[in-house]
Image (cartoon, grey):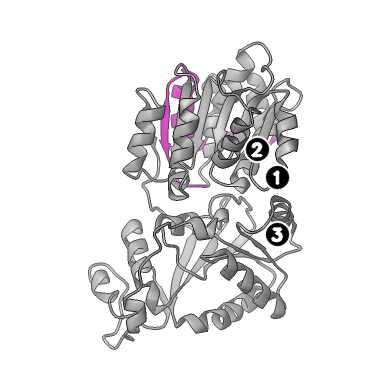
Amino acid sequence: MTTFDKMGLPKRLVTRLAETGITEPTPIQARAIPPALEGRDVIGLAQTGTGKTAAFGLPLLTALAESRGKPTPKTARALVLAPTRELVKQIAESLRPLVAGTPVSVETVVGGASLSAQEKRMARGADLLVATPGRLIDLMGRGAVVLAETRFLVLDEADQMLDMGFIHALRRIAAKLPKERQTMLFSATMPKQMDEIAASYLTNPVRVEVSPPGTAVDKITQSVHFLEKAEKTGRLIELLDGHRDDRAIVFGRTKHGAERLSKQLERAGFATASIHGNKSQGQRDRAIKAFRAGDVRVLVATDVAARGIDIPEVRHVYNFDLPNVPDNYVHRIGRTARAGADGAAVAFCAPEEISELRAIHKVMGCAIPVASGTPWEGLEPKQSRGGPRGAGKGAGKPPAKARARRRPRNKNRAAA
């Protein structure tokens, strides 16, 4: 399959795609769309930025267009679940142009927005509902959303939903869905707990994998700086100062840390905004809008943005704090080098982050090239086979406090 018109998609959809400049399917689209159009359940494994939204969106819109009738009040004929507000909005914004001028409606429900307003919109029913699990549970509890007539379901970025603790919400949602339905699950990785989700949600699925987990975009130049935690802010300002006209995303680990860093960068003269779990949906939307428009050049974020921002002009990604979940490193740096562009990903590693960097190297299957500093003791032996050359034996020894550091039990709550 090399073109959309040979897949059996409606001509109207193919024309809409061409009008938006999309004429050839990506690998995940070419392999996932045909079985989905046949009504098969699908498991799709691919990294962010590979076209997964169209891979499930085009079959969904085709099925909705072919089935007659309108949704009854409070129901959704098709449901897409995504882990973050930003990703929900991005999915909806990608699909709405494809149904413009047709009766098919696309609605969203997310946290941080008015419950009553979302309840009012869902009173009419929706052909396609895109939602975060938590807010969907809230509306179901109020009787504002009923899933008894949902015949199509998509779980997007399912591994991140597990990381963010949505497993119980997914179980509650599954119990309210009809058994006779088509389900598609898309994920960048396939952790063991995903087997439970797949068994609960899917029936005899077709499995499609187009890029191995942990694979970073080839056009991203990666580097790591070994430095003390107290030196990070100064080094970041120094590096950002070298490309003030370019857009850059800086990832921190916690909400408070991201906000504090954003204010420090503002005082240093950078046009900066931040998005994290303490921001309202309106604040997050305005920050991304300003970043997309170029009014803001530096966006400081927690992992809520690791998979929910698609801005081709992002040239630089900084891992100010290394992520607790190693797969999130790949998702973070995937915010750059989009739409065929080049990009740079810079990581900072303090002594207490040795275990995080080692886990990232394991997931990626290679070591990140060293830009400055000497790898901390405890990392070098793990890189002896295929790691970066020149790691001297005089590497600094991390303090006892860092060596005794334990990871938090709930990995991503602080970042939400």
Q: Earlier in the sequence, mark 3 or mark 1?
A: 1
User: Residue 26 in magenta?
Assistant: yes
**Residue 352 highlighted magenta (yes or no):** no
Q: Is residue 208 above or below residue 233?
A: above
Q: Position of residue 94 (x, y in %)?
A: 65, 38
Q: Amino acid at mark 2?
A: Val
Kind of residue at badge 3: Phe
Q: Residue at x 50, y 23 (%)?
A: 177
Mark 2–mark 1 contact, CB under 8 Å?
yes
Label placed on residue 264: none
Q: Is residue 21 visible?
A: no
Front residue of 149/152: it is: 149
Q: CA distance from mark 2 to mark 1?
A: 8 Å
Read off the magenta span.
Answer: 20-48
Q: Is residue 297 left or right of residue 133?
A: right
Mark 1 residue type: Ala
Q: Is residue 285 above or below residue 129?
A: below
Within 10 Å of the Cα at label 2, are there few (<14), some (14-19), or many (20+) other Cα atoms? many
The quarter of the picture where residue 394 lies is bottom left
Dot 1 corresponds to which residue? 113
Instruction: Name the quadrant containing residue 67.
Output: top right
Which residue is under mark 3? Answer: 291
Q: Secondary structure at mark 1?
A: loop
Q: Could one spot residue 59 in this view of the protein?
A: yes
- Which residue is identified by label 2? 109
